[in-house]
Amino acid sequence: MSIFLCFGTYTVYAQQPKLATFHEIAQVIIDQKIQNQTSTSISVISTSNQEIRVPVELDKKIHSMKNVTAVVITNEDKCVLGVVDKACVLINISSEGFAGGIPEAQSKGKEIGDGLIGDINKAFNIDTKFHSVFIHVDDKVNKELETTGVISGRGTVSAVYTFSKSDTSFLYEGLSTLLIPNEIRNSGGFLDVAKKIADDPTSSVTFSIIPKTGSSLFQLQVSRDQKITDKITSIDTLQFFGVEKLERSNYFSYDFFPLNSLVQVVVLSKEPIKITGHGGQIIPAVEKDGQKYPSDVSLPGWFFDPDSGDKLIGKYLFGKTVEATRDDLKFNIGYLSSPEQPINGIPTDNSLYILVGVGVAAAVAIVWYLKNIRTKH
């Protein structure tokens, strides 16, 4: 399933870009500001339950439950405070409209969670037990990464249910087999890297259902966190994934889907930083209504926005290519407190502009998609 991108530009493409409902995202967060760790993840995301096969009846019931913002299945260590050596189902609820403080939040959280957990157990063949109702109060990371907070933002109440914890490789294999049809699973691409990460005993797997107006966002993610021991100046993106190249899924081979396979790197720093060098090429930025966009999505290369400050966000677009190498995905950063660092600016071409009318209603992780690009539907 796909929709057309709407362009207003001086450039005419022989093959018009399209946007499919299925997405593969490779992401690295280098957090030298808050948690002092790197987070590496592969996510596959869709709004179609033909591509990520959540039972229609369960999805409808989640939509019908007032205040439910997400359903999350994860084996992440200590999914909330007090959970040890267990996998979790979190039924996340917005506390908006709760008038009775913590007691009401706990009571309503359990009531809503109990109304859904039986259907979740049946759909995913798990056997959970109620653990607690957890009230999220820390918004620091969500604010820094500009996320919606539906997973762990302030004001979110989680009804927490636990079940036996298994290795990530086992849980990932079970979830991916259940959720992702063979046509996609056998098409290679980022899913091959996800399976490799899942074999790491320090990795975790998370599946999320996020009800949105008209449809849900389904996301399967494998991730791995590592502590940062030294100040980072050279970023070898694929080293975090343990591969020499990253190939796009063959699922997209029948047409031109330049935004459906993305690599994103986010760098958070306690001091101002700047891009000082890069592999591959830079896709020049163009501005429209105060926002930056890539000037040509048919080109492979990096698009940085912002490219300086205490947070950098780099997105690598494949353009019309099908793979990216380690050299393509490397870049260097300089710390502006060190005057000897050479600073090379990222080019901006204001003579052209591109109006991209579509995107993804991303509610999980960080702004992995092009900033401020919105869905048409």
Image (tube, helix red, strand yellow):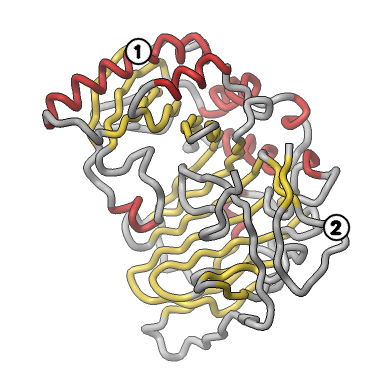
Q: Is residue 39 left or right of residue 374?
A: left
| Residue at numbered disc 2 | 15
Indicate the quadrant where residue 222 lies.
Answer: top right
From the viewer's perspective, is 161 left or right of 60? left
The image quarter containing residue 55 is: top right
- Mark 1–mark 2 distance (CA, rounded to whole Å): 48 Å
Q: Give the SS element for disc 1.
A: helix
Q: Residue at x 19, y 30 (%)?
A: 98
Q: Residues within 10 Å of mark 1 (few under 14, many from 20)?
A: few
Residue at 79% across, 53% down: 322
User: Is the Cβ of the residue at disc 1 closer than 8 Å to that at disc 2?
Assistant: no
Residue 262 falls left or right of residue 272: right
Q: Which residue is mark 1?
A: 115
Q: Amino acid at mark 2?
A: Gln
Tell me where residue 271 appears, x and y as whole percent: 35, 74
Q: Position of residue 124 (x, y in %)?
A: 52, 15
* Dot 2: element: loop
Residue 71 rendering spot, x and y as whole percentages? 42, 27
> Who's the residue at 70% across and 43% down the image?
20
**Residue 326 vs residue 336, the one in the foreground:** 336
The amino acid on which the numbered mark 1 sits, given as a three-letter code, is Gly
